[in-house]
Image: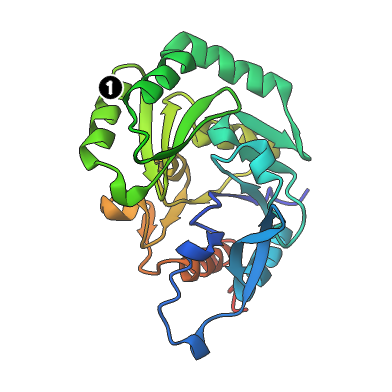
Amino acid sequence: MSAPKVLVASDLDRTLIYSSAALALTMPDARAPRLLCVEVHEAKPLSYMTETAAALLTELGDMAHFVPTTTRTRKQYQRINLPGPAPEYAICANGGHLLVDGVSDPDWHAAVTARLADECAPLAEVRDHLEATADPVWVRKHRVAEDLFAYLVVERELLPEDWVKELAVWAESRGWTVSLQGRKIYAVPKPLTKSAAVREVARRTGALLTLAAGDSLLDADLLLAADRGWRPGHGELAEADWTAPAITALPERGVAAGERILREFTQACGRPGAV
């Protein structure tokens, strides 16, 4: 029997794929990398990776269990058209849904929802608090994702910094965590984690080595659960200068960081990744 493949669990937005606003193309225009659109929404291109990153991801899909690991809902995830082999497993809603060949595993979802009911305040209480305290001056949308967590879409330049800190304190006492990512403020139950779902995929695949990457506070548990992890030079974790013994903090920012992360993944899987 061949040895189990490596499991590579990676966040998507602002880790492997980037909106036009997050590309951080700071080089002269003539030296900018060629980009591949990997997501279209309402007939408009939305997310990109470099063509080199796309080639690396295709290579990675042939040498490891690549598991997209995202806070996106299933519907939002399914808009993405990543290059390479279709992943057998994907993790959506921050671990609330474990997709197997594109279909949510009902037993996993039931176990997650039961744990949330036992260990933290109900979603309705958090949603009501957000609606009562968030100012319409800077809130553009209130959203509930998969009946698991809530988030706001805000005007970042108008958002009072103290409000986010106060929300985090309020949520902490109720078993929830708060994450500010770009124009979105997430309120997520603490037991709803990417790491738990990744451990389940590792169990099912028999993988002996887990690699991970992510940029936000909601990725910290994922990175800590992996044997090796990488974070880009942007995002919540970089802003907090967060690190851990098995974590590599990369200097690259924007879409260049996505390419670097994929190169690191392929190198760690035993190939040079010199695309």
120 or 160: nearer the eye? 160
In the image, residue 216 lies at what x, y percent? 40, 47
Quadrant position of the C terminus in the picture: bottom right
Q: Is residue 206 visible?
A: no
184 or 118: nearer the eye? 184
**Colouring rule applied to residues:** rainbow
Residue at image location 67% in from the left, 60% down from the top: 44
Image quadrant where residue 37 sits: bottom right
Per the image, label 1 sits on a secondary structure element best described as helix
Image quadrant where residue 47 sits: bottom right
Q: Is residue 43 visible?
A: yes
Image side of residue 153 versus residue 233, left or right? right
In the image, residue 231 lies at what x, y percent? 41, 56
* In the image, residue 171 above or below residue 32: above
Residue that carries the numbered disc 1 in the rendered image: 170
199 or 113: nearer the eye? 113
Image side of residue 69 versus residue 191, left or right? right
Kind of residue at badge 1:
Trp
Residue at image location 75% in from the left, 44% down from the top: 88
Badge 1 local density, few (<14 within 10 Å), some, or many (20+)? some
Residue at image location 77% in from the left, 39% down from the top: 102
* In the image, residue 193 above or below residue 27: above
Residue at image location 77% in from the left, 52% down from the top: 86
In the image, residue 198 lies at what x, y percent? 57, 37
In the image, residue 25 lies at what x, y percent? 45, 75
Image quadrant where residue 69 sits: top right
